[in-house]
Image (spheres, coloured by chain):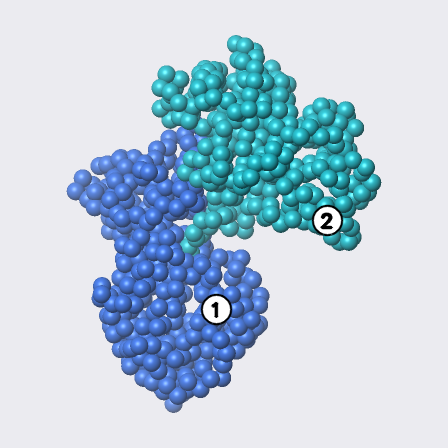
Amino acid sequence: MKNLSLLELEKTRLKFLAGRPVRSIARSLGRLSLDWLRPGDRYRRRAIDALTRRSGYSAQMAESMLKALFTELTEPKILGVLKSELGDPLVLDGFRRDRHAGVFRRAAGPGLIAHVFAGTSPGAAVWSFVFGMLMKASNVGKPSSRDEGLIRIYLESLDRRDRSLARTNRLLDARDRKGLAEVMRQSGLIVAYGDETTLDELQAQAPPRAPFVRYGHRASFSLYMKETLSLSRWKALARRTAADVWAMDQRGCLSPLAVYVERGGAVTPPLFARHVAHEIGRLPQPRRTRSRSAAHEIFRDRFKLRRLRGESALFWESRPRGSWAVYYDENPAFPPEARHQTVIVKAFDGLADVYGALWPFAGRLEAAALEAPGARRLAIARELARLGICRVCRAGTLQRPPLTWRHDGCYNIASWVKWTDLEV
Amino acid sequence: MASRLEREVLRFIRRYARRSAPEAAFEALALKLFAHQFEHNATYQKFCLLEGAGPGRVKRWKDIPAMPAAAFKEFVLVSFAQKKTVKVFRTSGTTGSPRGAHFFESLRLYEASLAAAFDKFVLPDRPSLDWHFLAMPPSEAPDSSLSHMMGVLNRRHAMGRARYYVTRSAARHDLLAEDLAAARRPVILLATAFSLKGFLDFLKASGTRIRLKRGSRLMETGGFKGRAREISKIELHADCAARLGLDERFCVSEYGMTELSSQFYDTTLRDAVKGFRRRPFMEGPAWARAVLADGLIRVFDLANLGSVMAVQTEDTGRRAGGGFELTGRAEASELRGCSLAYEKFVAS
């Protein structure tokens, strides 16, 4: 955006957005999502093209990602998240009575939100802007230099559907550090995504009193107890595991880097691992690239050395090598080095070993796909919560977080707004 | 047995010092070495068995199982009785991480290989030169293969009169600048890319420009190992041209590893001397061949008789001319998402 005038943006916001009912915004964004869910939609097609070209996803991965994203952004789901976080969505329009507190309350977003996106987590950018619009803020985003362009295409589609709403959103050039500094100085909230080092640097540049919300890089895993590896269910479980690994190319914060499988089920962990490999092999894989093949080769060589050390280690990989690989070992250590459709299935006997291996990563773990019989599932979830894991879900749904999920364990909208109480 | 094989490899090195070897000759000797190492190197044997490969089953040299270079960090990879070790070279390694170790029963092959390859790629015109080493002398860095190489070259070509400009405490850039400025003959400067960068920065800071005599040359190495290539080769050589008056075609990059006994070189100087008009690439001597396995460089080095002949590196490259060119370390060019990165976790 050249000649970005923040004053102009604020005028537009006051004119078109500040007084607009939140339901109307939700309805408009919901309709837009329905457009995006139609296979023939031209913006959707453009986004799939951009995601495959620039992010190295396969077309099917991109499709499944967009589907997961926009299914969560329909009108009922948007109203659902507002209810879940604010109690009454209409507090965004004016004072509403809070029955429990006996006061009237209203919530307002900041006038301007600066969003800083990093790396390739395309969905997060769309969520971020949607939340901003719902609280009637102007949004200015700076994509990363490796951005795949989804947010840009999304805003173009919004421009066609709802001109006045689209006009309160801007994107900076990925290299525009000066512009970003200016926006950060003026904004009432800074929302940033990226690795901890980048976030630290960014926070140091931010004005000292502006609220700074950070979403750092995280890792996820799967945990299956032996009862769920029954003869009738283990193959489906392997298929759902494969879907979790496949969906974000094992690059997202919700990608399961390790799959912990308890020994003693009807199927042994290595057999389960082999079937996961079989299922991943059936899914359409992205193009192999030189760097990807090389990364696989290095990973495989390290694994060979572990075998040489006498550890029990197996692997299955695509032919030709380089698009996916499934490893199996019996060392509970959490493997943050797994990526690019590389997953390690790990056999264990006692949960204590798994917790012990995860403990060093406490606070950097995002989600766990937990399969266990009812009562045990609750008990294990309690332990996982102590590790700072903020989402425990079913196998196969890791990559489809509901909009109501509290990203990184915090409210999304509720932590971005400011409240005013009116006492009677 | 080893000494008979050693003599055979030595003969190969002498015969093909200045010309390329026929495929069949390389293959026959490679397979012999493989059988020998399989039999005498227990760790390598286990590695091959896990790969499902053995002397009977491997028919082509390219199929010989390649040991990951990282294995030198945790295993003693010797094809002889370890107590007969006469020399150990160690990788520099970053603090805290283990260093790779390469054991030698004899340095005959190592020295024959390095001398012949150096002559072929850096001294094809057999010049008479003043020798300068921007590195520690072998006496101060006994486990550095690079310092050892310089020692060998010093003995062979400079009659022990070459100068070293790095001590344990400092790099003497001022002395080197003085000596280069005072040189009356063409000189040769050997350095690592990092130390050379330091020297060029020193020249820049002090505003010094030196005009070395025609025929002067540079061999620089490293810049890859253990870190992403932070120094652009092209920039480095352009700086050498500007600050030292070197002909850029006479700036030769070497690609070597502690885990190997032979080195690969840019063909640029050799091409210039021989009048070949082509884009330079990396080439090794006839007894060391590099292939690309999934984008990574894999080396088959017949001079690695005492350890493992086939070594898998973590350096990425691509095919170029009759050899390859380096493109960097694999990890640097990967696509990233919001998943926690391993290096970042280790670093914090």
Image x and y of residue B94, in percent: 60, 40
Q: What residue lies at 76% left-to-right and 40% top-to-bottom?
A: B213
Q: What residue lies at 46% left-to-right and 32% top-to-bottom?
A: B291
Please tell me which residue lies in front, A114 or A78: A114
- Determine whether the residue tagged by mark 1 lies in a helix, strand or loop: loop
Relative height, residue B230 to residue B91 (above, below) = below
Image x and y of residue A318, in percent: 31, 39
- Determine whether the residue tagged by mark 2 lies in a helix, strand or loop: helix
Q: Chain of mark 1?
A: A
Relative height, residue A353 to residue A125 (above, below) = above
Q: What residue lies at 36% left-to-right and 65% top-to-bottom?
A: A150
Please tell me which residue lies in front, B114 or B15: B15
Find disc 2 in the rendering and name its residue: B243
Image x and y of residue A289, in percent: 39, 46
* Residue B168 in sight here: no
Q: Colour of chain B?
A: cyan
Please tell me which residue lies in front, B347 or B174: B174
Report whether B214 appears left or right of B19: right
Find disc 1 in the rendering and name its residue: A173
Placement of the C terminus of chain A among the 4 image quadrants? bottom left
Amino acid of disc 1: Asp
Quadrant of residue A235 within the rendered picture: top left
